[in-house]
Protein backbone atom coordinates (compact mmCIF):
# COMPACT_ATOMS: atom_id res chain seq x y z
CA UNK A 1 0.00 0.00 0.00
CA UNK A 2 2.78 2.45 0.85
CA UNK A 3 4.29 2.20 -2.64
CA UNK A 4 0.91 2.87 -4.25
CA UNK A 5 0.24 5.88 -2.06
CA UNK A 6 3.69 7.31 -2.68
CA UNK A 7 3.36 6.89 -6.45
CA UNK A 8 0.12 8.81 -6.68
CA UNK A 9 1.68 12.22 -6.19
CA UNK A 10 5.14 12.08 -7.71
CA UNK A 11 6.01 15.63 -8.79
CA UNK A 12 2.79 16.38 -10.58
CA UNK A 13 2.44 13.20 -12.57
CA UNK A 14 -0.49 11.66 -10.77
CA UNK A 15 0.26 8.02 -11.16
CA UNK A 16 -2.05 6.12 -8.90
CA UNK A 17 -5.11 6.32 -6.72
CA UNK A 18 -6.23 9.90 -6.16
CA UNK A 19 -8.29 8.86 -3.20
CA UNK A 20 -5.11 7.93 -1.36
CA UNK A 21 -3.75 11.48 -1.55
CA UNK A 22 -5.23 12.96 1.58
CA UNK A 23 -4.37 15.69 4.03
CA UNK A 24 -2.74 13.00 6.16
CA UNK A 25 -0.45 11.94 3.34
CA UNK A 26 2.83 12.48 5.20
CA UNK A 27 1.70 10.38 8.15
CA UNK A 28 0.03 7.66 6.09
CA UNK A 29 2.97 7.36 3.73
CA UNK A 30 5.49 6.36 6.41
CA UNK A 31 6.89 2.88 6.03
CA UNK A 32 7.75 1.61 9.54
CA UNK A 33 10.34 -0.77 8.07
CA UNK A 34 12.07 1.80 5.88
CA UNK A 35 15.53 3.17 6.59
CA UNK A 36 15.08 6.73 7.83
CA UNK A 37 17.26 9.62 6.75
CA UNK A 38 18.69 9.80 10.26
CA UNK A 39 20.15 6.33 9.77
CA UNK A 40 21.39 7.02 6.27
CA UNK A 41 24.00 9.18 4.57
CA UNK A 42 23.91 11.08 1.28
CA UNK A 43 26.33 8.76 -0.52
CA UNK A 44 24.18 5.64 -1.11
CA UNK A 45 21.22 7.84 -1.97
CA UNK A 46 23.31 9.63 -4.58
CA UNK A 47 24.22 6.28 -6.18
CA UNK A 48 20.52 5.64 -6.74
CA UNK A 49 19.90 9.16 -8.05
CA UNK A 50 22.78 9.13 -10.53
CA UNK A 51 21.81 5.67 -11.74
CA UNK A 52 18.21 6.80 -12.27
CA UNK A 53 19.15 9.95 -14.18
CA UNK A 54 22.31 9.11 -16.11
CA UNK A 55 22.05 5.34 -16.34
CA UNK A 56 18.33 5.02 -16.98
CA UNK A 57 16.57 8.26 -17.99
CA UNK A 58 19.29 9.68 -20.29
CA UNK A 59 20.48 6.37 -21.75
CA UNK A 60 17.85 3.74 -21.05
CA UNK A 61 15.20 4.63 -23.63
CA UNK A 62 15.38 4.17 -27.40
CA UNK A 63 12.95 7.04 -28.11
CA UNK A 64 15.57 9.77 -28.37
CA UNK A 65 17.80 7.64 -30.61
CA UNK A 66 14.87 6.84 -32.87
CA UNK A 67 13.36 10.28 -33.35
CA UNK A 68 16.83 11.80 -33.83
CA UNK A 69 17.17 9.39 -36.79
CA UNK A 70 20.26 7.66 -35.41
CA UNK A 71 18.61 4.25 -35.30
CA UNK A 72 15.62 2.56 -36.95
CA UNK A 73 13.15 -0.08 -35.82
CA UNK A 74 11.96 -3.37 -37.19
CA UNK A 75 9.09 -5.10 -35.42
CA UNK A 76 7.88 -2.22 -33.25
CA UNK A 77 8.16 0.63 -35.70
CA UNK A 78 6.00 3.29 -34.04
CA UNK A 79 8.80 5.74 -33.24
CA UNK A 80 10.45 5.23 -36.64
CA UNK A 81 7.20 6.23 -38.32
CA UNK A 82 6.53 9.09 -35.86
CA UNK A 83 3.55 7.29 -34.34
CA UNK A 84 4.34 7.90 -30.65
CA UNK A 85 1.34 7.16 -28.45
CA UNK A 86 0.58 9.14 -25.25
CA UNK A 87 -0.15 5.90 -23.40
CA UNK A 88 3.49 4.89 -23.91
CA UNK A 89 4.91 8.07 -22.38
CA UNK A 90 3.79 7.63 -18.79
CA UNK A 91 7.03 6.00 -17.71
CA UNK A 92 9.18 8.77 -19.26
CA UNK A 93 7.13 11.42 -17.48
CA UNK A 94 7.06 9.54 -14.18
CA UNK A 95 10.82 8.90 -14.27
CA UNK A 96 11.46 12.64 -14.32
CA UNK A 97 9.67 13.26 -11.04
CA UNK A 98 10.80 10.02 -9.43
CA UNK A 99 14.41 11.01 -10.04
CA UNK A 100 13.82 14.55 -8.80
CA UNK A 101 12.39 13.00 -5.65
CA UNK A 102 15.56 10.93 -5.29
CA UNK A 103 17.68 14.06 -5.44
CA UNK A 104 15.42 15.68 -2.87
CA UNK A 105 16.07 12.73 -0.58
CA UNK A 106 19.82 13.15 -1.03
CA UNK A 107 19.48 16.79 0.05
CA UNK A 108 17.32 15.86 3.05
CA UNK A 109 19.90 13.33 4.16
CA UNK A 110 22.72 15.85 3.68
CA UNK A 111 20.93 18.47 5.78
CA UNK A 112 20.20 16.00 8.55
CA UNK A 113 23.78 14.73 8.60
CA UNK A 114 25.07 18.28 8.86
CA UNK A 115 22.69 19.00 11.71
CA UNK A 116 23.68 15.85 13.62
CA UNK A 117 27.42 15.89 12.89
CA UNK A 118 28.40 19.51 12.18
CA UNK A 119 32.01 18.82 13.12
CA UNK A 120 32.38 16.47 10.13
CA UNK A 121 31.51 19.21 7.66
CA UNK A 122 34.79 20.96 7.12
CA UNK A 123 34.90 24.22 5.20
CA UNK A 124 33.44 23.80 1.72
CA UNK A 125 32.23 20.23 2.22
CA UNK A 126 28.52 21.02 2.47
CA UNK A 127 28.74 23.36 -0.52
CA UNK A 128 30.38 20.67 -2.63
CA UNK A 129 27.73 18.11 -1.71
CA UNK A 130 24.92 20.55 -2.40
CA UNK A 131 26.45 21.79 -5.64
CA UNK A 132 26.46 18.31 -7.17
CA UNK A 133 22.81 17.75 -6.20
CA UNK A 134 21.78 21.04 -7.80
CA UNK A 135 23.70 20.37 -11.03
CA UNK A 136 21.98 16.99 -11.39
CA UNK A 137 18.61 18.67 -10.83
CA UNK A 138 19.31 21.21 -13.57
CA UNK A 139 20.48 18.48 -15.95
CA UNK A 140 17.26 16.52 -15.41
CA UNK A 141 14.89 19.50 -15.61
CA UNK A 142 16.64 20.87 -18.69
CA UNK A 143 16.42 17.54 -20.53
CA UNK A 144 12.81 17.02 -19.45
CA UNK A 145 11.49 20.40 -20.58
CA UNK A 146 13.31 19.95 -23.90
CA UNK A 147 11.28 16.76 -24.36
CA UNK A 148 7.81 17.93 -23.30
CA UNK A 149 7.85 21.74 -23.08
CA UNK A 150 5.84 23.28 -20.23
CA UNK A 151 5.76 21.13 -17.09
CA UNK A 152 4.87 21.27 -13.39
CA UNK A 153 8.03 22.94 -12.08
CA UNK A 154 7.65 25.46 -9.27
CA UNK A 155 4.88 23.44 -7.63
CA UNK A 156 6.43 20.06 -8.38
CA UNK A 157 7.41 17.65 -5.58
CA UNK A 158 4.93 19.22 -3.17
CA UNK A 159 3.05 16.14 -2.00
CA UNK A 160 0.27 18.28 -0.55
CA UNK A 161 -0.53 19.61 -4.04
CA UNK A 162 -1.74 16.78 -6.25
CA UNK A 163 -2.67 19.09 -9.13
CA UNK A 164 0.34 21.36 -9.67
CA UNK A 165 0.25 24.17 -12.20
CA UNK A 166 2.58 24.09 -15.19
CA UNK A 167 5.42 26.53 -15.81
CA UNK A 168 6.22 27.58 -19.36
CA UNK A 169 9.47 26.38 -20.88
CA UNK A 170 10.83 29.92 -20.79
CA UNK A 171 10.02 30.18 -17.07
CA UNK A 172 11.71 26.85 -16.45
CA UNK A 173 14.87 27.87 -18.32
CA UNK A 174 15.12 31.17 -16.45
CA UNK A 175 14.68 29.33 -13.17
CA UNK A 176 17.29 26.74 -14.13
CA UNK A 177 19.87 29.41 -14.90
CA UNK A 178 19.35 30.76 -11.38
CA UNK A 179 19.70 27.27 -9.88
CA UNK A 180 22.80 26.57 -11.91
CA UNK A 181 24.42 29.88 -10.95
CA UNK A 182 23.86 29.00 -7.29
CA UNK A 183 25.30 25.52 -7.82
CA UNK A 184 28.36 26.89 -9.60
CA UNK A 185 28.89 29.36 -6.79
CA UNK A 186 28.70 26.53 -4.26
CA UNK A 187 31.16 24.39 -6.19
CA UNK A 188 33.56 27.33 -6.54
CA UNK A 189 33.36 27.98 -2.79
CA UNK A 190 34.13 24.33 -2.13
CA UNK A 191 37.39 24.56 -4.06
CA UNK A 192 38.89 21.07 -4.41
CA UNK A 193 36.85 19.29 -1.74
CA UNK A 194 36.20 15.67 -2.76
CA UNK A 195 32.65 14.53 -2.02
CA UNK A 196 30.56 11.40 -2.54
CA UNK A 197 33.73 9.49 -3.49
CA UNK A 198 32.97 6.19 -5.21
CA UNK A 199 29.25 6.91 -4.76
CA UNK A 200 29.66 9.57 -7.44
CA UNK A 201 29.37 7.30 -10.45
CA UNK A 202 30.25 10.05 -12.92
CA UNK A 203 33.31 11.87 -11.54
CA UNK A 204 34.28 9.94 -8.42
CA UNK A 205 33.69 13.01 -6.24
CA UNK A 206 36.07 15.29 -8.17
CA UNK A 207 34.73 18.77 -7.47
CA UNK A 208 36.85 20.38 -10.20
CA UNK A 209 35.28 18.17 -12.86
CA UNK A 210 31.77 18.84 -11.54
CA UNK A 211 32.45 22.56 -11.81
CA UNK A 212 33.56 22.21 -15.43
CA UNK A 213 30.51 20.09 -16.17
CA UNK A 214 28.21 22.67 -14.57
CA UNK A 215 29.67 25.48 -16.67
CA UNK A 216 29.47 23.31 -19.79
CA UNK A 217 25.80 22.61 -19.08
CA UNK A 218 25.26 26.34 -18.67
CA UNK A 219 26.89 26.93 -22.06
CA UNK A 220 24.64 24.29 -23.65
CA UNK A 221 21.53 25.95 -22.23
CA UNK A 222 22.71 29.38 -23.36
CA UNK A 223 23.27 28.25 -26.94
CA UNK A 224 19.94 26.40 -26.89
CA UNK A 225 18.02 29.64 -26.33
CA UNK A 226 20.30 31.88 -28.41
CA UNK A 227 17.73 32.40 -31.17
CA UNK A 228 14.89 33.40 -28.84
CA UNK A 229 13.92 36.80 -27.47
CA UNK A 230 16.32 35.98 -24.60
CA UNK A 231 19.38 36.24 -26.87
CA UNK A 232 20.99 38.89 -24.67
CA UNK A 233 20.66 36.66 -21.60
CA UNK A 234 22.03 33.73 -23.59
CA UNK A 235 25.11 35.76 -24.52
CA UNK A 236 25.68 36.76 -20.90
CA UNK A 237 25.34 33.19 -19.64
CA UNK A 238 27.64 31.84 -22.36
CA UNK A 239 30.32 34.36 -21.43
CA UNK A 240 29.94 33.54 -17.73
CA UNK A 241 30.29 29.82 -18.43
CA UNK A 242 33.42 30.21 -20.53
CA UNK A 243 34.98 32.61 -18.03
CA UNK A 244 34.35 30.22 -15.12
CA UNK A 245 35.76 27.25 -17.05
CA UNK A 246 34.08 24.61 -19.23
CA UNK A 247 35.39 21.15 -20.14
CA UNK A 248 38.95 21.21 -21.47
CA UNK A 249 39.49 17.76 -22.99
CA UNK A 250 38.11 14.23 -23.19
CA UNK A 251 39.46 13.70 -19.68
CA UNK A 252 36.50 15.81 -18.52
CA UNK A 253 33.83 13.70 -20.28
CA UNK A 254 30.76 12.91 -18.18
CA UNK A 255 29.92 9.24 -18.72
CA UNK A 256 27.91 6.66 -16.80
CA UNK A 257 29.88 3.44 -16.12
CA UNK A 258 27.64 0.43 -16.62
CA UNK A 259 28.50 -2.69 -14.66
CA UNK A 260 28.43 -6.19 -16.21
CA UNK A 261 25.65 -8.48 -14.99
CA UNK A 262 23.97 -5.90 -12.73
CA UNK A 263 23.70 -2.52 -14.48
CA UNK A 264 24.43 -3.34 -18.10
CA UNK A 265 24.37 -0.89 -20.98
CA UNK A 266 20.70 -0.83 -22.07
CA UNK A 267 21.46 -1.33 -25.76
CA UNK A 268 23.48 -4.42 -24.86
CA UNK A 269 20.91 -5.76 -22.38
CA UNK A 270 18.06 -5.35 -24.85
CA UNK A 271 20.07 -7.06 -27.55
CA UNK A 272 20.34 -10.13 -25.32
CA UNK A 273 16.60 -10.69 -25.73
CA UNK A 274 15.66 -9.10 -29.05
CA UNK A 275 17.17 -7.53 -32.15
CA UNK A 276 14.81 -4.90 -33.51
CA UNK A 277 16.78 -1.63 -33.32
CA UNK A 278 19.72 -0.99 -35.66
CA UNK A 279 21.75 2.01 -36.95
CA UNK A 280 19.72 3.94 -39.50
CA UNK A 281 20.50 4.59 -43.13
CA UNK A 282 20.48 8.33 -42.39
CA UNK A 283 23.38 7.93 -39.98
CA UNK A 284 25.31 5.27 -41.89
CA UNK A 285 25.00 7.02 -45.26
CA UNK A 286 26.37 10.23 -43.76
CA UNK A 287 29.35 8.44 -42.24
CA UNK A 288 30.12 6.65 -45.50
CA UNK A 289 29.78 9.83 -47.58
CA UNK A 290 32.30 11.64 -45.36
CA UNK A 291 34.75 8.72 -45.21
CA UNK A 292 34.31 9.10 -41.47
CA UNK A 293 36.88 7.26 -39.31
CA UNK A 294 34.20 6.68 -36.66
CA UNK A 295 32.22 4.44 -39.02
CA UNK A 296 33.62 1.10 -37.83
CA UNK A 297 33.54 2.27 -34.21
CA UNK A 298 29.86 3.23 -34.50
CA UNK A 299 28.57 0.31 -36.59
CA UNK A 300 29.46 -3.18 -37.74
CA UNK A 301 28.95 -3.83 -41.45
CA UNK A 302 26.47 -6.46 -42.57
CA UNK A 303 26.73 -8.88 -45.46
CA UNK A 304 26.01 -6.03 -47.88
CA UNK A 305 28.58 -3.75 -46.27
CA UNK A 306 27.72 -0.52 -44.49
CA UNK A 307 24.01 -0.41 -45.31
CA UNK A 308 21.86 1.12 -42.59
CA UNK A 309 18.30 0.10 -41.82
CA UNK A 310 15.82 2.29 -43.68
CA UNK A 311 14.27 4.92 -41.46
CA UNK A 312 10.55 5.49 -41.68
CA UNK A 313 9.32 1.98 -42.45
CA UNK A 314 8.81 -1.29 -40.64
CA UNK A 315 12.00 -3.01 -41.73
CA UNK A 316 12.53 -6.72 -42.17
CA UNK A 317 16.01 -6.92 -40.72
CA UNK A 318 18.46 -9.59 -41.71
CA UNK A 319 22.20 -9.99 -41.81
CA UNK A 320 22.66 -7.63 -44.75
CA UNK A 321 22.15 -4.54 -42.57
CA UNK A 322 24.77 -2.80 -40.48
CA UNK A 323 24.56 -3.37 -36.74
CA UNK A 324 25.95 -1.65 -33.66
CA UNK A 325 29.69 -2.12 -33.36
CA UNK A 326 31.04 -4.96 -31.27
CA UNK A 327 32.34 -2.43 -28.74
CA UNK A 328 28.74 -1.49 -28.00
CA UNK A 329 26.89 -4.80 -28.03
CA UNK A 330 29.62 -7.36 -27.40
CA UNK A 331 31.62 -8.10 -24.28
CA UNK A 332 30.08 -7.73 -20.85
CA UNK A 333 27.64 -4.87 -21.37
CA UNK A 334 29.94 -2.27 -19.83
CA UNK A 335 29.96 0.22 -22.72
CA UNK A 336 29.40 3.58 -20.97
CA UNK A 337 26.33 5.78 -21.16
CA UNK A 338 26.62 9.39 -22.34
CA UNK A 339 25.86 12.45 -20.24
CA UNK A 340 28.03 15.16 -21.82
CA UNK A 341 31.34 15.07 -23.70
CA UNK A 342 34.04 17.61 -24.41
CA UNK A 343 33.36 17.23 -28.15
CA UNK A 344 29.88 18.68 -27.64
CA UNK A 345 31.35 21.54 -25.60
CA UNK A 346 33.84 22.39 -28.35
CA UNK A 347 31.00 22.55 -30.90
CA UNK A 348 29.01 24.75 -28.51
CA UNK A 349 32.02 27.08 -28.28
CA UNK A 350 32.29 27.10 -32.07
CA UNK A 351 28.65 28.07 -32.52
CA UNK A 352 28.78 30.65 -29.73
CA UNK A 353 31.86 32.24 -31.30
CA UNK A 354 30.23 32.15 -34.74
CA UNK A 355 27.23 34.03 -33.30
CA UNK A 356 29.50 36.52 -31.49
CA UNK A 357 28.22 35.35 -28.12
CA UNK A 358 31.82 34.79 -27.01
CA UNK A 359 35.23 35.58 -28.43
CA UNK A 360 37.37 32.88 -29.97
CA UNK A 361 38.41 31.16 -33.18
CA UNK A 362 35.42 29.40 -34.73
CA UNK A 363 37.57 27.10 -36.85
CA UNK A 364 39.78 26.12 -33.91
CA UNK A 365 36.75 25.24 -31.79
CA UNK A 366 35.17 23.29 -34.68
CA UNK A 367 38.31 21.28 -35.31
CA UNK A 368 38.72 20.65 -31.59
CA UNK A 369 35.21 19.17 -31.53
CA UNK A 370 35.88 16.89 -34.48
CA UNK A 371 39.22 15.82 -33.03
CA UNK A 372 37.75 15.12 -29.60
CA UNK A 373 34.96 12.95 -31.00
CA UNK A 374 37.19 10.98 -33.36
CA UNK A 375 39.83 10.48 -30.66
CA UNK A 376 37.23 9.37 -28.12
CA UNK A 377 35.85 6.70 -30.47
CA UNK A 378 38.96 5.59 -32.35
CA UNK A 379 41.98 6.60 -30.28
CA UNK A 380 43.44 8.47 -33.26
CA UNK A 381 43.45 12.12 -34.27
CA UNK A 382 41.24 13.52 -37.01
CA UNK A 383 43.86 15.22 -39.18
CA UNK A 384 43.05 13.22 -42.33
CA UNK A 385 39.32 13.47 -41.72
CA UNK A 386 39.51 17.25 -41.33
CA UNK A 387 41.13 17.38 -44.79
CA UNK A 388 38.09 15.71 -46.42
CA UNK A 389 36.32 18.11 -48.78
CA UNK A 390 33.00 18.14 -46.88
CA UNK A 391 34.63 18.21 -43.46
CA UNK A 392 37.36 20.83 -43.90
CA UNK A 393 36.22 24.06 -42.27
CA UNK A 394 34.37 26.43 -44.58
CA UNK A 395 33.57 29.79 -43.00
CA UNK A 396 30.69 30.34 -45.41
CA UNK A 397 28.98 27.16 -44.19
CA UNK A 398 30.24 27.17 -40.62
CA UNK A 399 26.87 26.93 -38.89
CA UNK A 400 25.77 23.93 -40.97
CA UNK A 401 29.12 22.18 -40.53
CA UNK A 402 29.10 22.69 -36.77
CA UNK A 403 25.54 21.39 -36.48
CA UNK A 404 26.17 18.28 -38.58
CA UNK A 405 29.40 17.33 -36.86
CA UNK A 406 27.79 17.88 -33.47
CA UNK A 407 24.89 15.57 -34.41
CA UNK A 408 27.37 12.91 -35.55
CA UNK A 409 29.33 13.25 -32.32
CA UNK A 410 26.15 12.80 -30.27
CA UNK A 411 25.75 9.19 -31.40
CA UNK A 412 23.91 7.22 -28.69
CA UNK A 413 23.16 10.43 -26.78
CA UNK A 414 19.63 10.36 -28.11
CA UNK A 415 17.73 13.09 -26.26
CA UNK A 416 20.47 15.65 -26.90
CA UNK A 417 20.88 14.63 -30.56
CA UNK A 418 17.13 15.08 -31.04
CA UNK A 419 17.18 18.50 -29.35
CA UNK A 420 19.96 19.68 -31.64
CA UNK A 421 18.26 18.31 -34.74
CA UNK A 422 15.06 20.16 -33.85
CA UNK A 423 16.92 23.39 -33.10
CA UNK A 424 19.16 23.45 -36.18
CA UNK A 425 17.20 21.36 -38.68
CA UNK A 426 20.39 19.36 -39.37
CA UNK A 427 20.44 16.70 -40.58
CA UNK A 428 17.22 17.49 -42.40
CA UNK A 429 14.51 15.31 -40.86
CA UNK A 430 12.01 13.37 -42.91
CA UNK A 431 9.12 15.88 -42.95
CA UNK A 432 6.30 13.36 -42.65
CA UNK A 433 5.72 9.62 -42.73
CA UNK A 434 2.31 8.15 -43.45
CA UNK A 435 0.77 11.54 -42.76
CA UNK A 436 2.52 11.97 -39.39
CA UNK A 437 4.84 14.97 -38.97
CA UNK A 438 8.34 14.94 -37.52
CA UNK A 439 8.14 15.11 -33.70
CA UNK A 440 9.16 18.47 -32.27
CA UNK A 441 8.15 17.40 -28.75
CA UNK A 442 6.51 14.48 -27.00
CA UNK A 443 2.87 14.88 -26.06
CA UNK A 444 1.83 14.70 -22.43
CA UNK A 445 0.95 11.29 -20.99
CA UNK A 446 -2.67 10.28 -20.62
CA UNK A 447 -2.45 10.54 -16.83
CA UNK A 448 -2.07 14.32 -17.06
CA UNK A 449 -5.07 14.72 -19.35
CA UNK A 450 -7.30 12.94 -16.86
CA UNK A 451 -5.96 13.58 -13.36
CA UNK A 452 -4.49 17.07 -13.75
CA UNK A 453 -6.85 18.14 -16.50
CA UNK A 454 -7.36 21.80 -15.62
CA UNK A 455 -3.66 22.66 -15.38
CA UNK A 456 -2.88 20.44 -18.37
CA UNK A 457 -5.39 22.28 -20.54
CA UNK A 458 -4.17 25.68 -19.36
CA UNK A 459 -0.62 24.77 -20.36
CA UNK A 460 -1.74 23.45 -23.76
CA UNK A 461 -3.73 26.63 -24.43
CA UNK A 462 -0.94 28.95 -23.25
CA UNK A 463 2.12 27.30 -24.76
CA UNK A 464 0.95 25.03 -27.58
CA UNK A 465 -1.81 27.03 -29.25
CA UNK A 466 -4.44 24.69 -27.84
CA UNK A 467 -2.99 21.56 -29.50
CA UNK A 468 -1.14 18.92 -27.52
CA UNK A 469 0.52 17.55 -30.63
CA UNK A 470 4.03 16.33 -31.37
CA UNK A 471 4.56 18.68 -34.31
CA UNK A 472 4.10 21.88 -32.26
CA UNK A 473 7.46 23.58 -31.80
CA UNK A 474 8.91 24.31 -28.38
CA UNK A 475 9.79 27.82 -27.25
CA UNK A 476 13.47 27.73 -28.27
CA UNK A 477 12.70 26.36 -31.76
CA UNK A 478 10.50 29.30 -32.69
Image (cartoon, helix red, strand yellow):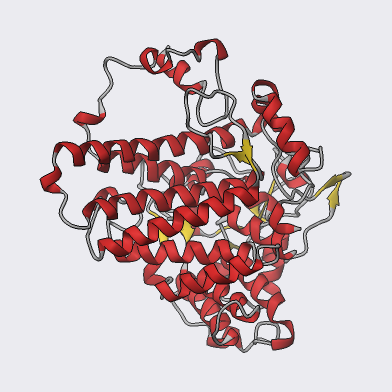
Outermost residue on the right side: it is 435
Q: Nearer the viewer, residue 164 or 75?
A: 164
Residue for point 25% across, 30% down: 37
From the top left corner, tell me how far across and down residue 87 is, in percent.
Answer: 68, 28
User: Is 219 left or right of 474, judged from the image as shown?
Assistant: left
Q: Say if residue 410 shows up in the picture.
A: no
Residue for point 43% across, 41% down: 52
From the top left corner, tell me how far across and down residue 18 is, in percent.
Answer: 56, 14
**The quarter of the displayed image where residue 365 is located:** bottom right
Give the quarter of the figure containing the N terminus: top left
Asked if 344 appears above or below 63 in the picture, the reply is below
Q: How many marks?
A: 0
Q: Nearer the viewer, residue 419 or 453?
A: 453
Q: Nearer the viewer, residue 316 or 287?
A: 287
Asked if 92 appears above or below 192 in the picture, the reply is above
Outermost residue on the left side: it is 119
Q: Nearer the viewer, residue 301 or 263?
A: 263
Residue for point 65% across, 25% down: 452
Give the quarter of the figure containing the C terminus: bottom right
**The quarter of the displayed image where residue 292 is located:** bottom right
Asked if 387 appears above or below 256 in the picture, the reply is below
From the top left corner, tell me how far across and down residue 302 is, in percent.
Answer: 64, 60
Residue for point 36% across, 70% down: 251
Q: Say if residue 135 shows up in the picture.
A: yes
User: Is 195 left or right of 31, judged from the image as shown?
Assistant: left
Asked if 468 appears above or below 380 in the picture, the reply is above
From the top left corner, tell me how far across and down residue 305 is, in percent.
Answer: 67, 65
Amino acid sequence: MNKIIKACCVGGAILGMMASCTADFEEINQNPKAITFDASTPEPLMVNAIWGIAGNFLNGDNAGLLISHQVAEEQYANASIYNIQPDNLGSNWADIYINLRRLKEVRQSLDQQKEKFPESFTEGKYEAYEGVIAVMEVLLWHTATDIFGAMPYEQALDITNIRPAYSTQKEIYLGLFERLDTAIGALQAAEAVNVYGSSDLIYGGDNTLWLRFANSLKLRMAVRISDTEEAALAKTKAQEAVSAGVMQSNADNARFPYVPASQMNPIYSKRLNRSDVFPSDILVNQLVAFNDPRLSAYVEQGSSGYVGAQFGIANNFDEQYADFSSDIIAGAGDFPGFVMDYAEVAFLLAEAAHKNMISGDVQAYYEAGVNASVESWTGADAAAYLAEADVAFDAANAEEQIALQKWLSLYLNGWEAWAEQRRTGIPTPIPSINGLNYPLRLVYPTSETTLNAENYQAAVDQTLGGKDQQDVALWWVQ
